[in-house]
Image (cartoon, rainbow, N blue to C red):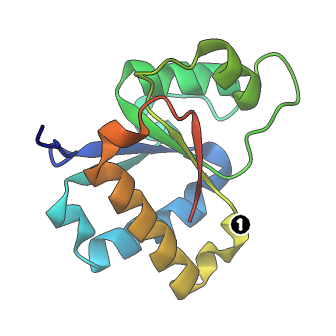
């Protein structure tokens, strides 16, 4: 059976906590030509009308409903609407993964940012292999 790839493109929703670093990461994706190889776009909460104080559950549901991959740096399991609890409650085998930058502060560094960009592109190209995985720590 031939593998299909994510070449149709993906949209990444940058979590509010990581917007500045996500812009750097997206710049790297563009500079390296990755966004042309596989159509990737990055959007922010403001672009889609999400409030900065949206709960993790609201953000995850929005991303899933709209076919977006959530990129975050710090969503955890602090309460019943935390990202971790949401993934435990609602993730299915068809759910898009959440990408969590392991060390968001390191995105200022070019090498780390390039490693994250490469991992994002791997996921974009082979997205079907990552469906249902809930959370992927990058790089």
- Taking depth in this image into account, of 47 and 17 the one nearest to the observer is 17
Q: Residue at x 61, y 79 (%)?
A: 108
Q: Which image quarter holds the N terminus?
A: top left
Measured as percent of width and height from the top left, residue 47 is found at 41, 39
Query: Left of 136 or right of it: where is 77?
Result: right
Which quadrant of the view contains residue 102?
bottom right
Q: Residue at x 16, y 64 (%)?
A: 37
Q: Residues within 10 Å of mark 1 (few under 14, many from 20)?
A: few
Note whether 57 is above or below 96 in the view shown: above
Measured as percent of width and height from the top left, residue 118 is found at 40, 69
Q: Residue at x 36, y 24 (%)?
A: 66
Which quadrant of the view contains residue 80?
top right
Note whether 94 is above or below 5 in the view shown: above
- Taking depth in this image into account, of 3 and 52 the one nearest to the observer is 3
Q: Which image quarter holds the C terminus?
A: bottom right
Q: How many marks?
A: 1
Q: Residue at x 35, y 59 (%)?
A: 122
Query: Left of 55 or right of it: where is 23?
Result: left
Q: What SS does tag 1 mark?
A: loop
Measured as percent of width and height from the top left, residue 96 is found at 43, 31
Which quadrant of the view contains residue 76?
top right
Residue at the left extreme of this rendering: 2
The residue indicated by pointer 1 is: 103
Measured as percent of width and height from the top left, residue 112 is found at 57, 79
Residue at the front extreme of this rendering: 1
């Amino acid at each position: 059976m031939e593998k299909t790839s994510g070449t149709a493109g993906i949209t990444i929703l940058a979590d509010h906590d990581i917007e500045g670093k996500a812009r750097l990461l997206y710049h790297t994706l563009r500079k390296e030509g990755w966004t042309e190889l596989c159509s990737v776009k990055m959007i922010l909460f403001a672009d889609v009308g999400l409030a900065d104080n949206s709960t993790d559950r609201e953000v995850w549901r929005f991303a899933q409903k709209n076919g977006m991959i959530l990129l975050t740096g710090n969503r955890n399991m602090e309460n019943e609407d935390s990202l971790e609890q949401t993934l435990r409650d609602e993730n299915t085998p068809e759910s898009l993964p959440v990408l969590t930058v392991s060390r968001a502060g390191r995105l200022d560094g070019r090498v780390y940012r390039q490693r994250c960009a490469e991992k994002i592109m791997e996921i974009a190209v082979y997205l079907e292999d990552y469906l249902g995985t809930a959370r992927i720590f990058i790089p």
